[in-house]
């Protein structure tokens, strides 16, 4: 087995109240580029205007701008979630950005305050409610994402369908935290959480005895912008 060390940055941001939107893309790009991150994770509802939700075009522009500003194109960027709407529905979506573009999106489907947020922003669309269980690929790793109230459903899906567990599991939340209990991770895999309610980070690793242990923060840059830094070591199969 080969080992690969990944530099991880998890944003600490209070998203239980309104977040200033103007510099978010610039700030995230700064964190990724200046700290040479391989992985960046933000909390739920970080991209949400105070009096409306984003349009589909605006959502796509956020993703495009982030993609263009990241120096390490092979980094995995999950900036948190974006509230947006199209002609029929409204969405709470976490994009997965890498290689200069979008590699996938996860749409939340359980209502954990989303309908209330949309109502306050005069959105009359129905909530997106389809189950979006999906496993993404990044650098050969199996990656899964869930948003807050959806937590646990992906693991149940993988277990019921007898599909392989994940190398990396991301929980984007505002009120839910990643526990050291069962998570949909293979041995040696990592779970990562950015919680916008307690504005905290949490990282766990699955061990061979099926026990998930907490991973200590390597450095905390709270004075420089509220970022927790972690070093995680992934196991990769040696290519023939």
Image: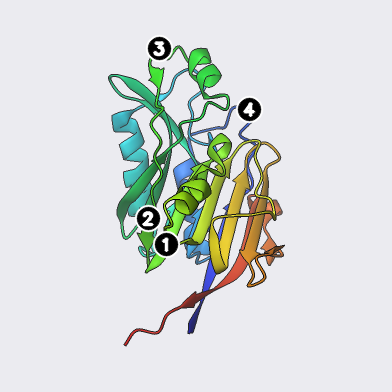
Q: Which mark is residue 124?
A: 3
SS for tag 3?
loop
Mark pair 2, 1: CA separation: 6 Å
Left or right: where does residue 163 sit relative to residue 86? right
The residue positioned 70% from the left and 55% from the top of the image is: 180
The residue positioned 48% from the left and 18% from the top of the image is: 118
Residue 146, image x, y percentages: 50, 44
Between residue 54 and residue 30, name the one nearer to us: 54
Near mark 1 (Cα within 10 A), the count class, few <14, some 14-19 or many ≥20, is some
Mark with earlier residue (3, 1): 3
User: Do callouts 2 and 1 mark residues in contact (Cβ within 8 Å)?
Assistant: yes
What residue is shown with label 2?
136
What residue is shown with label 4?
17
User: Do callouts 3 and 4 mark residues in contact (Cβ within 8 Å)?
Assistant: no
User: Which one is closest to the eye, mark 1 or mark 4?
Assistant: 1
User: Which one is closest to the eye, mark 3 or mark 2?
Assistant: 2
Mark pair 3, 2: CA separation: 31 Å
- Is there any visible trace of residue 84 in the rendered image? yes
Near mark 2 (Cα within 10 A), the count class, few <14, some 14-19 or many ≥20, is some
Mark with earlier residue (3, 4): 4
Name the quadrant of the C terminus: bottom left
């Amino acid at each position: 087995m080969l080992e690969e060390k990944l530099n991880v940055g998890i944003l600490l941001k209070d998203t239980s109240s309104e977040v200033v939107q103007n510099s978010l893309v610039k700030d995230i790009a700064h964190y990724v580029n200046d700290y040479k991150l391989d992985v960046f994770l933000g909390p739920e509802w970080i991209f949400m205007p105070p009096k409306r939700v984003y349009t589909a075009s605006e959502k796509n522009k956020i993703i495009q701008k982030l993609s263009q500003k990241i120096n390490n194109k092979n980094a995995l960027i999950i900036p948190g979630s974006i509230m947006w709407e199209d002609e029929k529905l409204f969405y709470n979506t976490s994009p997965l950005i890498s290689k200069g573009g979008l590699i996938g999106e996860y749409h939340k489907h359980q209502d954990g305050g989303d309908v209330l947020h949309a109502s306050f922003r005069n959105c009359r669309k129905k909530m997106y409610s389809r189950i979006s269980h999906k496993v993404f690929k990044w650098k050969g790793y199996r990656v899964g994402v869930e948003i807050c109230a959806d937590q646990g459903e992906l693991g149940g899906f993988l277990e019921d369908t007898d599909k392989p567990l994940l190398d990396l599991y991301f929980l984007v939340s505002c009120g839910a935290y990643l526990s050291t209990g069962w998570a949909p991770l293979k041995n040696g895999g990592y779970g990562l959480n950015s919680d916008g309610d307690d504005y905290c980070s949490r990282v766990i690793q699955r061990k061979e005895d099926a026990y998930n242990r907490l991973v200590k923060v390597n450095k905390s840059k709270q004075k420089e912008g509220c970022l927790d830094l972690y070093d995680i070591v992934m196991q990769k199969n040696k290519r023939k």
